[in-house]
Amino acid sequence: MAGGTDTTPDPLAPVLDAARGSGWTTWTLPLAGVGDKAGLMERCASSLALPDWFGRNWDALADCLTDLSWAPPAAGRLLVVSGWQEYARTAPGEWEIAQKVFSAAVEYWRDAGTPLEIVLTMGSAPAVEHDGG
């Protein structure tokens, strides 16, 4: 409808609310429209509010996800990645590296007191702002 606003409920809202209610920090990483590594790195920087020292390369992303001293203290952290399918089709080799970085970060935090979980949505979900805390 012209001039209207999208009132479709966000299917992720209950999950993100539950995580936040348990003391977790949540971030969303909407990748719709991202077609290359530079776009992915820029989206990571802005959506996750990464520190200024983030070098916008794979090693720097891995460093940021395994050294969360830049992030607010939390009982745990949940990153929800949506709209990744286009990037996976456009840059399959880069997407494979991104998945390895994500998996390594989850594994790094697996036995920590503050775990990191990364979830890839299967459908297209509305963008949700991170809670910042």
Image (cartoon, rainbow, N blue to C red):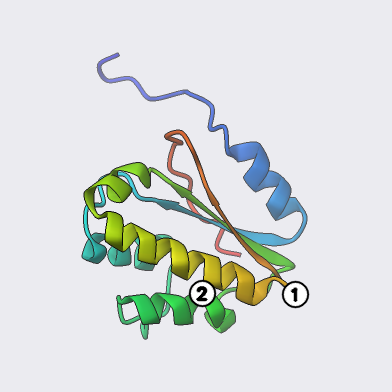
Mark number, residue 111:
1
Q: Residue at x 31, y 44 (%)?
A: 32
Q: Residue at x 75, y 52 (%)?
A: 21
Q: Residue at x 35, y 75 (%)?
A: 58
In the rendered image, the quadrant that contains the N terminus is top left
Dot in front, 2 or 1: 1
Could you say which quadrant of the image residue 17 lies in? top right
Q: Residue at x 62, y 76 (%)?
A: 108
Give, as a three-letter code, the residue at label 2.
Leu
Q: Position of residue 40 (x, y in %)?
A: 30, 61
Q: Is residue 4 visible?
A: yes
Indicate left or right for 96 with 109 as reference. Answer: left
Indicate left or right for 28 with 31 as reference. Answer: right
> Neighbour class for label 1 at 10 Å: few (<14), some, many (≥20)?
few
Indicate left or right for 29 with 117 as reference. Answer: left
Could you say which quadrant of the image residue 43 lies in? bottom left
- At mark 1, the secondary structure is loop
Looking at the image, residue 11 lies above or below residue 31 = above
Q: Position of residue 98 (x, y in %)?
A: 39, 64
Residue nearest the viewer, comparing 92 with 85 = 92
Circle 2 sits on which residue? 65
> Neighbour class for label 2 at 10 Å: few (<14), some, many (≥20)?
many
In the rendered image, the quadrant that contains the C terminus is bottom right
Give, as a three-letter code, the residue at label 1.
Asp
